Amino acid sequence: MVELGAAIALGKPTFLFRDDFRRCTDSEQYPLNLMLFTGLLEDGWERHYYTRVDEIGDPQKALAEWAGVANPTKI
C-alpha cells in the first residue's frame, strides 16, 4: 500500500488487480477499499481495474494503453 500511495501522490498511473473474490466492502459500486481508488479516474476507473489474468493484455484496458501495446507504433 505504501508504493500505491507514493504513486498516487506523484501522479503516476495506477492499476488494480484483484484475484480475491471475497467481499471486502459494503459498496456495490466500488469492489475494493475506497482508498485504492483515489489514484484512478472518477469516470472510467473500470479500465484500470482487473479481476482476471487474461484482462492484463486486453487492449481496451488502461495497462495495455500505458504500456504502448494497445496501439503499437509501426516502424
Image (spheres, helix red, strand yellow):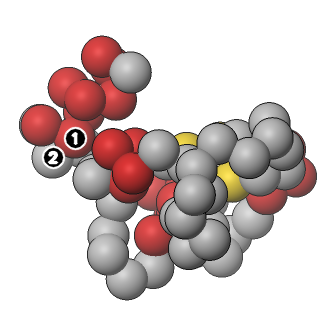
Q: Is mark 2 on a helix, strand or loop?
A: loop
Give percent across and percent down for residue 52. Answer: 84, 50
Picture layout, residue 59 above or below residue 48: below
**Residue furthest front in the image:** 26
Residue drawn at x 11%, y 37% is 10
Residue that numbered label 1 is attached to: 8
**Side of 71 relative to 18 (left or right):** left
Q: The N terminus is located in which quarter?
A: top left
Q: What residue appears at the point 27 percent right and 53 percent down from the top-left corner?
A: 38
- Name the residue rendered at 40%, 44% in the picture: 36
- Circles 1, 2 touching at the beta carbon (< 8 Å): yes
**Residue carrying label 2:** 11
Observer-nearest residue: 41 or 12?
41
Neighbourhood count class around disc 1 (C-alpha, 10 Å): few under 14, some 14–19, many 20 upward: some
Q: How far apart are marks 1 and 2 (CA)?
A: 5 Å
Q: Three-letter amino acid code at disc 2? A: Gly
